[in-house]
Image (cartoon, helix red, strand yellow):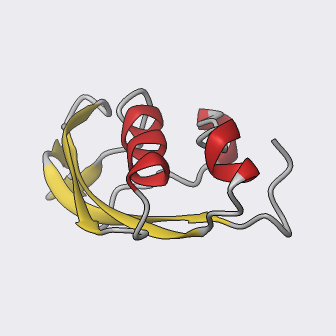
């Protein structure tokens, strides 16, 4: 079972769109490898697939490190598990 990072009650914030990246018209999708600890906290995080723009990748990394998760469960016990989180930076549909 995958950890749940989308649950609305967790209130995980979207990564802020870096002002310089917005000004330069940069957009793209970064996919992060995230270690979700059994306690529901974020362990290690690294870039699985870059957006092609270091500013966007770093914004995603810094924000996801602060997220809280509902951990994966195995035989009723919370377990540490790695999974991928896609983060889209689009100038057309980003509210921040």
Q: Position of residue 90 (x, y in %)?
A: 71, 67
Q: 92 or 32: which is nearer to us?
A: 92
Q: 70 or 56: which is nearer to us?
A: 56
Look at the image and tell me in which quarter the C terminus lies: top right
Tell me: residue 1, above or below residue 39.
below
Q: 72 or 20: which is nearer to us?
A: 20
Task: Name the residue at 43% across, 61% down.
Answer: 53
Horizontal side of residue 60 vs 28, given as left or right: left
Q: Quadrant of residue 64?
A: top left
Determine if residue 80 is in view: yes
Q: Position of residue 22 (x, y in %)?
A: 72, 51
Count of numbered marks: 0
Q: 57 or 31: which is nearer to us?
A: 57
Tell me: residue 62, above or below residue 73.
above
Horizontal side of residue 37 vs 25, given as left or right: left
Horizontal side of residue 86 vs 18, given as left or right: left
Task: Name the residue at 66% across, 44% down.
Answer: 17
Task: Name the residue at 65% across, 34% down.
Answer: 11
Determine if residue 14 is in view: no
Look at the image and tell me in which quarter the N terminus lies: bottom left
Q: Position of residue 61 (x, y in %)?
A: 36, 42
Q: Position of residue 55 (x, y in %)?
A: 46, 47
Question: Furthest residue to the front?
Answer: 24
Task: Name the residue at 13% across, 46% down.
Answer: 80
């Amino acid at each position: 079972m995958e950890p749940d990072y989308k649950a609305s009650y967790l209130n995980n914030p979207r990564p802020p769109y870096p002002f310089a990246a917005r000004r330069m018209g940069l957009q793209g999708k970064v996919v992060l490898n995230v270690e979700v600890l059994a306690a529901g906290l974020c362990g290690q995080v690294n870039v699985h697939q870059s957006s092609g723009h270091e500013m966007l990748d770093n914004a995603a990394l810094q924000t996801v490190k602060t997220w809280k998760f509902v951990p994966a469960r195995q035989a009723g016990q919370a377990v540490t598990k790695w999974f991928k989180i896609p983060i889209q930076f689009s100038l057309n549909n980003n509210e921040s």
